[in-house]
Image (cartoon, rainbow, N blue to C red):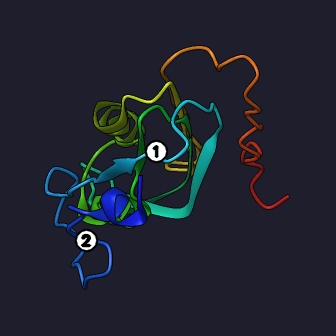
Amino acid sequence: MTEHDIYSGLTQLGTKTDLPNSPQDAVLEKVPNPQAGTDYAVRFTAPEFTSLCPLTGQPDFAHIVIDYVPGDYLVESKSLKLFLGSFRNHGAFHEDCTVSIGKRLQELLNPKWLRVGGYWFPRGGIPIDVFYQTGAALPGVFIPDQGVPTYRGRG
């Protein structure tokens, strides 16, 4: 598999691409996994994730951590960045945002394993942590703790 084969067909990488208006409008792209057949973990961390409260329109903030063990495909990182950014003007509860991210990646990649942790900053004085996982972690693959401590306020 050559580099040209892996990246052919991508529509966003290497071009100026505007932030999608909504997660539904976002185009998530995948590339063939050049290490298919080898189990390993991939992590994406989005410490400045934002969305909107669907009732008040006020901004919500989260630290999103995505871990997956790829099968035949990898998510193309620019398309993932644009997808996550598309939530900026999207009104949805914390649970909906976190689970929607997980389901969209599961549908696109069909990974061997996937976990999304949404560590949300307080809304109404209560922080909410939301987790989506497709099953038990694979034996023999190192899956580190997501490393995001429980919210402690000002210390």
Q: Is residue 84 left or right of residue 66?
A: left
Q: Is residue 77 left or right of residue 25?
A: right
Q: Nearer the viewer, residue 60 or 134?
A: 134
Q: How many marks?
A: 2
Question: What amino acid does circle 1 point to?
Answer: Asn
Asked whether residue 79 is in view, the answer is: no
Question: What amino acid does circle 2 point to?
Answer: Gln
Asked whether residue 28 is in view, the answer is: yes
Q: Which residue is mark 2?
A: 12
Residue in the picture at 50% in, 50% down: 123
Which mark's residue is nearer the viewer, 1 or 2? 1
Relative image position of residue 138 (x, y in whole percent): 65, 19
- Pick the quarter of the image with the C terminus: bottom right
Q: Quadrant of residue 101?
A: top left
Q: Is residue 69 left or right of residue 51?
A: right
Relative image position of residue 22 (x, y in whole percent): 18, 58
Query: In the picture shown, does residue 135 fall above or below 153?
Result: above
Q: Which residue is mark 1?
A: 33
Q: Quadrant of residue 13?
A: bottom left
Q: Is residue 1 left or right of residue 26?
A: right
Relative image position of residue 10 (x, y in whole percent): 24, 64
Q: Nearer the viewer, residue 44 or 30?
A: 30
Relative image position of residue 69 (x, y in whole percent): 56, 33
**Disc 1 residue crowd, few under 14, some 14–19, many 20+, Cα 10 Å:** some
Residue lying at the far front of the rendered structure: 1
Residue in the picture at 64% in, 39% down: 41
Helix, strand or loop at mark 1: loop
Q: Nearer the viewer, residue 62 or 104?
A: 104
Q: Are marks 1 and 2 in contact (CB under 8 Å)?
A: no
